[in-house]
Each structure stands twice: as C-alpha cells, then as structure tokens.
Image (spheres, grey):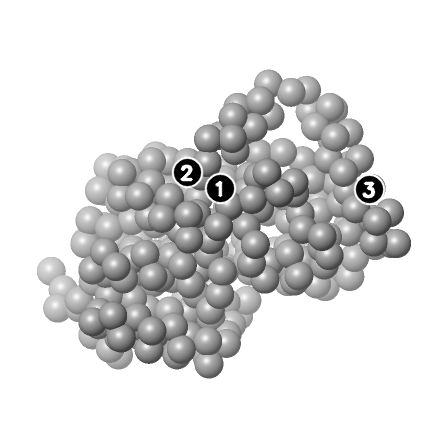
Amino acid sequence: MTSLRPITVITGASAGIGAELARVFARHGHELALVARREDRLRALADEIAATGARKPIVIVADLTQGDAARRIGEALAAQGAEPQFMVNNAGFGLVGSAASRDRDEQLAMIDLNVRALTSLSLAFVDSLARHRGGLLNVGSMAGFMPGPGMAVYYAGKAYVLSFTEALHSELKSRGVRVSVLCPGPVPTEFADRAGAKKGLAPNILTQSAEFVAQQGFDGLMQGRRVIVPGTLNKLIIMLIRLFPRSLLLAIIDSRQARRRSAHGT
C-alpha cells in the first residue's frame, strides 16, 4: 500500500496533442502532472484547467533528453505526495530530409527523446501503474507502420514505439496495467514546423484535429485497446499498408518526399 495519491503524467504537454490530452484527462476527473520544457505554456495550461474547477495540475519543467529525467519526475511527484496512475508519453519531434544530409547530432537527439526517453518513462513507473490499476499511453504515429525515406530516423523511431508498446501490452496485462499506442496521421500542430515541412507532412484528407486524436487516445486507453488509429480512413490505410509489398511502399513514400523537396527548392 502507499499513501501517495494517483496522478496522470503527460509529457510534451505544452502544445498540440499533449495539451489536448491534458484537457481530456482533466475533464474525466484525473489530476495531472504536466511535463515539458516551456514553463510558461505549462503554467498557462494548468491555470486553464484549474479554472474549470479541476484540481490544478502539477507543473514539472524537464528536459527529457537528460538521462535522469525519470528520476527527477518521480522525485517531483513524491514531493507533492503523488505517484503515476497513468503515464502518457507524448513528447517527441520529427525531421524532414534525407538522413545523410541532416545534422547527425540533431537526429541522435530525436532518438534520445522519441525512443530512449519514452522507453525510460514507460518502465520507470510500472509498479505504481500496477498499484493503481492504471495504464500507459505512448504516442506513436501511422509512420510506425511503414518505411520512411525522407524522414528515415523519425519513421524508424515510431516503428520502435509501436513494437515496444505492443509487447508491453502483452507483458503488463497480467498486472492489470492497460498499455496502448496511439498512432495518429497528420495533425495541424507545431510538429510540422519543427520538422521543417513547409506544406505539411501528408494529404489534407488524412488530417485530424488534436482534439479528436486526444479523445480517441483517451477512449482507447480506457478500453484497453492495444493499438489506436484515429479515423476510419486512416484505419483503412493501415490495413492496406500491411498488404503492400515493402518495395512499393518505399517507392511511394520516396516519391512524395521528392515532390516535397522539389516544391521547397531543397
């Protein structure tokens, strides 16, 4: 038994899908801990949530690429008398461009955040997730189902997130921990600007709002679904991708990225 109260931890909560996930969890009565680097945005979101009558979220300013981030988050929560019931790993970024031409250190930093930090935080709090019969939600991407020339490291990282989370879903089921991976298509957030994509990352017909994706993620996690792909069309595309020869997928994605590079003059 523990005297620490259960809380939902959301990383990358300063904008986009992370901020919307915070709003959804708060609406459903979850006390939150918001984690990101931009303190001003976290505090503004915490104030917004508190104004709805919910308990004001704990704000934890952290750089998740630092090796001791999980320990620091755990200590910050314990100091507030809390421990994770739900862990939501949303923090991450992408980079557009061929792997050989992009800055190597920047790509390694992307692996540190999208893969290493997500893995660390997924495993760091398993005991408290089990204690409170809670769960783990990792934010992946439709990119995880396919190869990604033009965004090779990002796609490969999301493939890891998909495989790793599916395995944890099986491993932790006996402990009563729900584990889901949320795999959205394109969402109009700051992500595309950070990635260097001037005209978005995919056709507009696949685009979904951050609000819709967050609600789908919450519902799927609470239902114990292993993989959550928001939207009927996106689900259909994932089904078709699994039937396509790998060589054809590579050609299609490479051609689209080449057209984007041409349009951007790069």
First in sequence: mark 2 or mark 3? 2
User: What residue is shown with label 3?
Assistant: 259
Residue 75 visible: no
Location of residue 27 (image quadrant): bottom left
> Residue at the location (71% across, 47% down)?
151
The reply to whether dot 1 and dot 2 touch (C-beta < 8 Å) is yes
First in sequence: mark 1 or mark 2? 1
Query: Split into 4 quadrants, where in the image is the N terminus?
Result: bottom left
The kind of secondary structure element at disc 1 is: loop
Instruction: Give the distance between the C-alpha atoms of the residues marked 3 and 1, in whole angstroms.
Output: 25 Å
The kind of secondary structure element at disc 2 is: strand
Q: Nearer the viewer, residue 117 or 224?
A: 224
How packed is label 2: few (under 14 Cα within 10 Å), some, or many (20 or more)? many
Query: Split into 4 quadrants, where in the image is the C terminus?
Result: bottom right
Q: Tell which tag, 2 or 3, sits nearer the viewer.
A: 3
First in sequence: mark 3 or mark 1? 1
Instruction: Give the distance between the C-alpha atoms of the residues marked 1 and 2, in whole angstroms.
Output: 6 Å
Location of residue 141 (image quadrant): top right
User: What residue is shown with label 1?
Assistant: 183
The kind of secondary structure element at disc 3 is: helix
Question: For the residue marked with disc 1, what is the amino acid?
Answer: Cys
Question: For the residue marked with disc 2, what is the amino acid?
Answer: Ile
Point out residue 19 in the picture as x, y percentages from the top left corner: 42, 63
Point out residue 29 in the picture as x, y percentages from the top left corner: 20, 60
Q: Nearer the viewer, residue 19 or 147?
A: 19
